[in-house]
Image (cartoon, grey):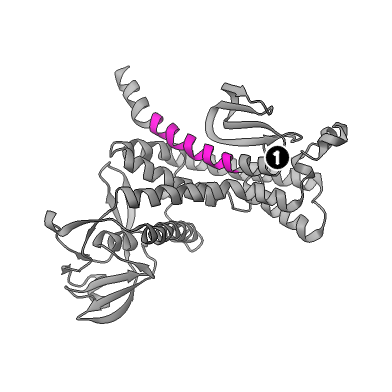
Amino acid sequence: MFEFAWWLLSYIAPFLLVLTVIVFVHEMGHYLVARWNGVAIQTFSVGFGREIWGFTDRLGTRWRLSLIPLGGYVRFVGDMNEASLNDPEFVAKIPPHLRDNLFSQKSVWQRIAVVVAGPLANVIFTFIVLYGLLLGVGRYYTEPVIQDVIANSIASEAGILPGDKILSVDGYVVRGFNDFQRLVSSSPEREVTILLDRFDREIEISLVPAAVPVIDRFGNENRIGRIGVSRSISPEDVVRFYPGPIEAVSMAVEEMVFLVDRTFAFLADFFVGRGDVEQLGGPIKVAQISGEVATLGFIALLNLTALLSLNIGIFNLFPIPMLDGGHLVYYLIEAIKGKPLSQRIQEIGFRMGMVLVGTLMIFTVVNDIF
């Protein structure tokens, strides 16, 4: 009993906290922009399924916490379901003076704004968290200078020498040796371009890191890139850097660009045969990671929440019916054609999207277990 309670607190509680924050931020983006455009909102739900707790506000919106915590939705008055498919019969029956408050009756550009607002809220949340952490906590750095190069390694054959100072990798500024390690390790079997400073002379080198399986501090196996360089680090080598308010903006944006870039590079690997299916994770893996990161402290868990928020925001823009990106495609087609797609086509797309997302969910859960 004690072990189960400990597991619940260690893994499920951090997972629910992280997911609830991300879902709330995402749906709040939809909600606020919908309200600003005069849309009548029926339900704001964190989670799916049966309501666990909720209340109705003075505007008639039901705010609810639902049983299945794997997402959420904002349902507008006149929607047929949580995916915001229009209910023509309801629209036909509603009094004309109330019809202007329906989401389906708003201009296509207003509907596009409402759809984009969810993922955008995730992106803004990520920026605020990263920016705040840079100003409040700062960064720990070690000078990005190569100390040792393993003989006959990828780095050695590419021409990297001890004493070389790393300036950038693939255009990303390297401020510390940990930056260099992260940029290389996140590019297994993908070519990277390294800019070096050697005796005040800049040298550009391209190489392909080898894919090496490693075990992290929590016992998880990960596939990372290695080139065969290292440096020893003593306590006096580590400095804590606090960027100014302006510099922190560029650093936070650079971090977000890096995360998006590496996410798409990871997905692209599957199309060229380099992808490792074992690296794909679903809710179970996210729960495990959340629990493990929570042991490192609140700051680490907050940072993880911000990074997952960005990924979920980007994922929701994929052109899959049922996701925000699918709705966006529908509305862009409507803006070009001058009239919406038929209800039947939208329903077919919704069903296909539901099957695709459901299949992906089942695959990642099975992958997590086995």
Number of numbered discs overlaid on the protein picture:
1
In front of the other: 239 or 145: 239
Q: Is residue 348 left or right of residue 215?
A: right
The structure residue drawn at horizontal position 65% and vertical position 47%, both measured from the top left corner, is 115
Is 17 situated above or below 347?
above
Viewport quadrant of the C terminus: top left
What residue does disc 1 label?
84
24 in magenta? yes
Q: Quadrant of residue 343?
A: top right
Is 296 situated above or below 66?
below
**What span is in magenta?**
12-29
Q: Residue furthest top?
A: 1
In front of the other: 63 or 245: 245
| x and y, in percent, of residue 326 in the image | 66, 50
Q: Residue furthest bottom?
A: 201
The structure residue drawn at horizontal position 77% and vertical position 35%, both measured from the top left corner, is 78
Q: Is residue 41 left or right of residue 93?
A: left
Q: Quadrant of residue 65?
A: top right
Would residue 101 be visible to someone looking at this image?
Answer: yes
Q: Is residue 283 left or right of residue 217?
A: right
Q: Quadrant of residue 335?
A: bottom right
| x and y, in percent, of residue 231 in the image | 17, 63
Viewport quadrant of the N terminus: top left
Mark 1 surroundings: few (<14), some (14-19) or many (≥20) residues within 10 A = some
User: Please, what is the dominant secondary structure of the magenta stretch?
Assistant: helix
Q: Amino acid at mark 1?
A: Ser
Would residue 370 be visible to someone looking at this image?
Answer: no
Q: Secondary structure at mark 1?
A: loop
In front of the other: 276 or 258: 258
The structure residue drawn at horizontal position 43% and vertical position 33%, both measured from the top left corner, is 17
| x and y, in percent, of residue 285 in the image | 41, 40
| x and y, in percent, of residue 167 in the image | 29, 71
